[in-house]
Image (cartoon, rainbow, N blue to C red):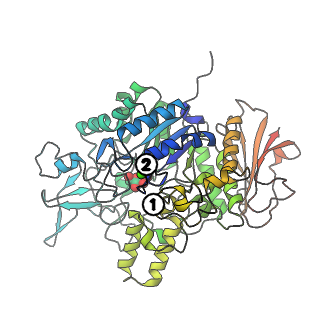
Amino acid sequence: MSAPTPNWWKKGTAYQVWPASYKDSNGDGIGDIQGLIGTLPYLKDLGIDIVWLSPMYKSPQKDFGYDISDYRDVDPQFGTLADLDELIKKCHDMGMKLLLDLVINHTSDEHKWFLESKKDKTNPKADWYVWRDPKIVDGKRQPPNNWRSIFGGSAWEYVPERDQYYLHLFVPEQPDLNWELDEVRQAIYKEAIVFWLDRGVDGFRVDTCNLYSKNTSYPDAPVTLPGEVYQPAFTHFVNGPRMHEWLREQRQQVLDNYGDVAMVGELPGTEAAEVLKYVAAEARELSCVFDFDVVSLGGRHGDGVKKHQVHAHDLPSFKEAFRKQQHLTRGTTAWTTCFLENHDQARSLDRFATSKPEFREKAAKMLATLLGCLTGTLFMYQGQEIGMTNIPDSWGIEEIKDPDSLNAYNDVKDRHDADPLWLKRAMSGIQRVGRDNARTPVQWDSSANAGFSTGKPWMRVNDNYPEINVADQQKDAKSVLSYWKQMNQIRKKYADLTVFGDFELWDYLDPDVFTFTKENKTNGFTNKKLLTFLSFSDEEQPMHYPPDCKGKEMELIVSNVDTPGQYLSPWEARVYLVTL
Ligand code: GLC
Ligand code: CA
């Protein structure tokens, strides 16, 4: 018997497109699907196998597409259904797969389901969302409980027509669907999933897919932020009692009719043991998930931490977060992903390495080396391949578009009577971890607007586009882009070690150097090991060899310097293939 074919979504390198800022084809200043279609050869050449397209559905854009008003249509600002069909076909013709974003915890408040539901308490969709009566305190109307929205403020919004509140875990324009109802789940499956699988998409990145099942008695959350009116209520809505039942139902009733559909879950605030229940192959729920330990470093994710309170982290905690993520699926039937960036995170160069001009390119290649060697499906994010950076420190709050950042800023403003020093602190938090860092337009060339659009970009282009752009890097064999291309090839060539190997951290306390090995005792290079050294320092650093690699035959397979010396130069990366 031959070995079973591994799932297609394991070995492939994925690339996330956040459409508004990717590439504008018609000069209206907003990226679109035709813009993306035009760059498919570029993505193919970069070594991309899977394109993940963030929401392009019809949407009032209150949370940039994550508030959907019609699952079965494309927002006119991004194009038409015909453009999407063309995208599916062209991806497939070029041997690439396409994932869409599946946002079904909530809809937009302009979705026809919600418009009907909010009319009164007796309409046919009256229970399609989560409605509760007000709590009357001292004769005054209050939200039903003290839950805090993930984006700040109360998680409840009042509707006079019903004299009731509806639940929104995110912005008020994103009412949560009532998954408890059979007919709601069936409607979601039909409109949001089947509709697209029938058109040929290969799977989904599943938005906040552990929040559907709530504690339906809606009790107050315990006070973990003393002095605050609204409290983080994660224990009452994360990984709720019916999550597994519903994900299995979805797989069995819907996905199984379409073969090996990839479901890449976003599971915020979930402990390792809990994650395994979703991704174990036999559970048949999700294909793999994103782990947020790395990107949440310095903040206590899930604690309702505020942007201006995220603090610096050290290298050992960065390594430890990776160790935990890499070991989670080891020896199990489950699968994982690796990533450092997406549309909700700051740029990895600023967040985890350095964007100092003298080290920036080298550091970007070093991070590419790290990701290229990790186990799991690799997810890259637009602009990461050229080392795009955070918004400049000189930008003020007027450039910020993200509702999450704006809420955080206004919260500080209200609490501290617009005190300038407080506002400075709020802004520096947004500059460090705000979502807009990843949402500035992609820098395609050094012409006006970075070649993103011939019109006025909907969001300001990062000032550094003359130095960081695709066109210049395509001409330069030593660019970050060329390095990523090489790294993606190496990742495939040594896939048994990189994609499928076992990760081992070495000398995790070393504050400046990240050293790890990858090996695979069952497949491929069974008598070899990959040994990776990564410097996270502005200074030269010595290397510490793991004992079993010392004195062995070593072949350098990739490095971000031409001739590696005895020591690691600042931000240097090297990968050796060691013969054991
Ligand atoms: C996810 C998305 C984020 C969005 C939120 C609400 O976390 O990644 O961008 O704001 O869900 O849909
Ligand atoms: Ca456009």
Question: In percent of the image, x 26 and y 60: which residue is there?
Answer: 156
On screen, 518 above or below 414? above
**Residue indicated by mark 2:** 32
Q: 546 above or below 355?
A: above
Ligand 2 neighbours mark 2 (CB distance < 8 Å): yes
Q: Secondary structure at mark 2?
A: loop
| Quadrant, the N terminus | top right
> Outermost residue toward the right?
551
Residue 374 spot, x, y in % from top left: 65, 45
Answer whether residue 280 is visible to the viewer in this image: no
Q: Quadrant of residue 327?
A: top right
Of the numbered discs 2 and 1, the one sitting upstream in the chain is 2
Q: Amino acid at mark 1?
A: Pro
Task: Look at label 2 and name its amino acid.
Answer: Asp
The label on residue 24 is none
Viewed as shown, does residue 489 lie left or right of 441?
right
Q: Which residue is mark 1?
A: 457
- Give left or right: position of 426 versus 119: right
- The image position of residue 242, as x and y in percent, is 34, 41
